[in-house]
Amino acid sequence: MLPWILSSAAKDEYMEARRPKRAITDISDYDLPETSDTGPASPKADELPTCLLCVCLSGSVYCEEVNPDMTVVPALPKETAYLYARFNKIAKIRNRDFADMATLRRIDLSGNLISEIEDGAFSKLPNLEELSLAENRLTKLPTLPTKLVLFNANFNNLKTQGVKATAFKKLTRLAYLYLGNNELTAVPHLPESLHVVHLHNNKISAITDETFCKGNTSYYIRHNLYQVRLDGNPVKLSQHPYSFVCLETLPVGWYN
């Protein structure tokens, strides 16, 4: 076992999504009309105004652990820039969920039950910079907006056939890519802009001299990329001695 440990000066700049310790939004906190046992049923989450279910505050919408269960993305105020809809029971993202939401800069849907995303759901968000889909049930990725800086899909069921080899190629501003704890068997194309890439705990069994570098050339140095995680994969890094020659630091973690 060879411990390859990143220096303390380049510690992980990102912590995986954790359940926030905040009050649960409950409609019982509001003065809604009382109904008798024989009266109409309690309203569902998608039948209530968004800012009654959620906290809406100067461009930010917080819809975390909503009660009653939130199963779809709520209608958002037009000025929404930041959406936090973590730890709900949203199962599908539709194209219309974020239609005409040009102001969105961050979407966090961690900890839901999302297994399907329609391919155009995020592609028409020109200012989206951060997208977190961690802790869901995805097997494939949709088309992603080109201005993303951070993309997190840790703890899903992503498979290589569901992630195109060029899925991130056109994301020229992408700096932080988190694909750990999935079922990937190959490394997708990684844009030059990346600073951090996490691919730990997948099923990657092989890499090449061009996965991170540019083959045999000794003149190419990848200055931006300072943190790589491949631990927890069957790949044996000792069999690929030239795969990291362009990096200034070796991959983090323990490897065979």
Image: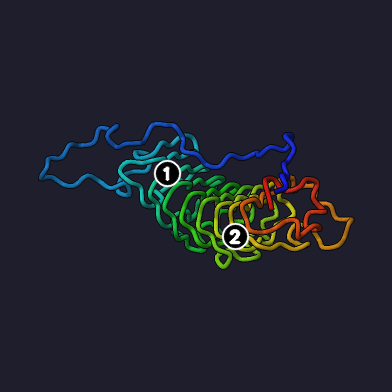
Label 2 or label 1, whichever comes before in sequence order: 1
Considering only vertical position in the picture, is 2 above or below 30?
Answer: below
Question: Where is residue 161, by image quadrant?
Answer: bottom right
The residue that disc 1 covers is: 87
Q: Position of residue 255 (x, y in %)?
A: 68, 50
Coloring applied to the structure? rainbow
Question: Where is residue 204, by image quadrant?
Answer: bottom right
Residue 108 as seen in the image, left or right of residue 12: left
Task: Say which amino acid is labelled 2.
Answer: Lys
Q: Nearer the viewer, residue 255 or 114?
A: 255
Q: Residue furthest right?
A: 219
Q: Residue furthest bottom?
A: 161
Q: Position of residue 60 (x, y in %)?
A: 49, 38
Q: Residue furthest front?
A: 1
Find numbered disc 1 in the image and state the secondary structure of the residue it sits on: loop
Residue drawn at point x = 13 percent, y = 45 percent? 39
Residue drawn at point x = 74 percent, y = 34 percent? 9
Q: Is residue 127 visible?
A: no
Q: Nearer the viewer, mark 2 or mark 1?
A: 2
Question: How many numbered marks appear?
Answer: 2
- The tag on residue 203 is 2
Q: Position of residue 193 (x, y in %)?
A: 73, 51
Q: Nearer the viewer, residue 237 or 193?
A: 237
Query: Are circles 2 and 1 on residues that touch, CB within 8 Å?
Result: no
Q: Is residue 10 visible?
A: yes
Considering only vertical position in the picture, is 29 above or below 174?
Answer: above
